[in-house]
Image (cartoon, rainbow, N blue to C red):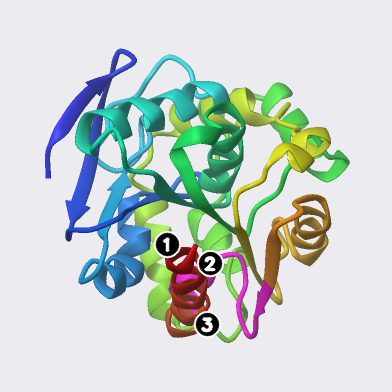
Amino acid sequence: MPYLSIKDARIYYQSKGEGNPIVFLHCWTCNRLFWKYQIEKFSSQYKCIALDFPGHGKSEPAKKYAPEFLSEIVYELIAKIISKNQKIILVGHSLGGVVALQHVLDHKDNVKGLILVDTTARLNQPTLRTLSSLFALTDYSTFIPNRRMVAHVTTHPLSDVKIKDFIKDQIAKVPSFVIAQVWKDMINFDVAHKLREIKVPTLIIVGDLDVITGIKDAVFLHLSIKNSKLRIVPRSGHMTILEQPEKFNSYMLEFLQKINEL
């Protein structure tokens, strides 16, 4: 699994399988490993590409983390590793969904299908701004929530403790200054007024107990993106890809089959 130098950042990525490309974008404080169940499932038929955003996983930190910047990293990575005539299926979870939305708006012509997971079109909301103000009122380079608490908040109460431990351990690997800077650069993201510009087939998936973004955000995406389908995953929080991988994969497979028919 190689590195690429993109936008003054060394980006680590994984590519497995052959066929039409699927690009997976991970959540804030997470990494490509969160897609392990999807890559295991779909790499037998597709070229599965999962990168670590700057400062996450094995990628080196960058100076900025705005959605537009991360979108261009994705665009340049795709240009380097897949054929020019191939369009991608873009799959984004939470922060990755934010970047996926930005990307499909920036580069409409290279996306064949879009899967948005536990995400939102607008981070600029009162509850999220309250969290942002906490960073502003303190030394945000060291103010990071308890990792175990985050693992519990982002998952369903009945989810396996091994999942919670995995999340906690992976979050702990991300430098505090990166966590804080990503949040500062992302907080003004709001493309709610642009969603009707998205014309590609879109699948929206959300956990029934996702308290980070949640069903309200998912429904808004569904009502705003014309060619979209909404799926709610039972007994799942903000981490549907880990908590209910079989159910998630079944919804994704159904979507991919329909895309292949187009």
Between label 1 and label 2, give the one nearer the viewer.
Answer: 2
According to the picture, the residue beneath numbered tag 1 turns out to be: 167
Between label 2 and label 3, give the one nearer the viewer.
Answer: 2
Q: Which mark is residue 159?
A: 3
Please rate how many residues cluster around mark 1, counting C-alpha atoms within 10 Å: few if below 14, some from 14 to 19, many from 20.
many
Q: Report, in whole angstroms, how far the alpha carbon at label 2 lies from the one at label 3.
A: 10 Å
Is residue 82 found left or right of 178 in the rendered image?
left
Q: Report, in whole angstroms, how far the alpha carbon at label 3 lies from the one at label 1.
A: 12 Å
Which is more N-terminal, label 3 or label 2?
Answer: 3
Q: Is residue 25 visible?
A: no
**8 above or below 183?**
above
Q: Is residue 202 visible?
A: yes
For the point 57% across and 47% down, the residue is 97
> In front: 81, or 205?
81
Q: Secondary structure at mark 1?
A: helix
Q: Secondary structure at mark 2?
A: loop
